Amino acid sequence: HVQLVESGGGLVQAGGSLRLSCGSSSGHTGRMYCMAWFRLAPGKERERVASIYFADGTTDYADSVKGRFTITPGNAKNTVNLQMNSQEPDDSAMYYCAADPSISCADYEASHPYAYWGQGTQVTVS
């Protein structure tokens, strides 16, 4: 069905920057009304880092990354980027791209799962 692919992860020193990208490699070509980045670190629950709600153009961020991370639409439809600046060791995690075709996703709580997920890209901040 819909396959999302992330790229851009890697090793970065504290204070450095990484840019993650995500796009659909196959499947559904209709508009995704929401796309988001989640992260999962060992011993922690999954958390939504940033989201963009295409239905109204708004974005939302976890408090821990506000002012440091920026989510933006990609050059193609159903793509998204995450610019991560001033990174901290606590940012180390597997980062997952997610998308949802339902317009109702604009009202999802931060813990609400999305319909489609990528395989993840590892970010390690030393």
Image (cartoon, rainbow, N blue to C red):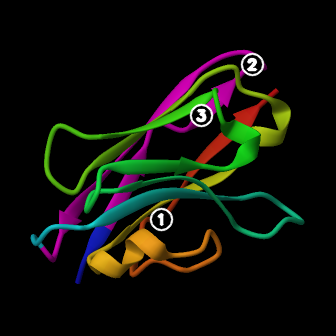
Work out whether residue 119 or residue 72 is closer to the camera in this orientation and state it: 72
Q: Is residue 90 left or right of residue 8?
A: right
| Badge 1 amino acid | Gln
Q: Residue at x 45, y 77 (%)?
A: 114
Q: Is residue 65 left or right of residue 27?
A: right
Q: Residue at x 63, y 27 (%)?
A: 68
| Residue 124 vertical placement versus 48 (above, below) | above
Can residue 12 be found in the magenta stretch? yes
Q: Residue at x 33, y 46 (%)?
A: 80
Label 2: which secondary element:
loop
- Graded by Cα atoms within 10 Å as few (under 14), some (14 to 19) or many (20 or more), the crowding at tag 2 reads few
Compute the Cα span from label 3 to label 1.
15 Å
The quadrant holding residue 41 is bottom right
> What range of the chain is rendered magenta?
4-28
Which numbered marker is on residue 10? 3
Q: Earlier in the sequence, mark 2 or mark 1?
A: 2
- Read off the residue under disc 2: 13
Q: On the rendered image, what quadrant is the C terminus found in?
A: top right
User: Contact (CB < 8 A) between labels 2 and 1?
Assistant: no
User: Contact (CB < 8 A) between labels 2 and 3?
Assistant: no
Q: Residue at x 78, y 20 (%)?
A: 14
| Badge 3 amino acid | Gly
- Number of marks in picture: 3
User: Contact (CB < 8 A) between labels 3 and 1?
Assistant: no
Secondary structure character of the magenta stretch overall: strand
Compute the Cα span from label 2 to label 3.
10 Å
- Graded by Cα atoms within 10 Å as few (under 14), some (14 to 19) or many (20 or more), the crowding at tag 3 reads some
Q: Is residue 93 left or right of residue 58?
A: right
List the single residue furthest toward the right. Answer: 43
**Residue 22 percent across, percent down from the top left:** 35, 50
Compute the Cα span from label 2 to label 1.
24 Å
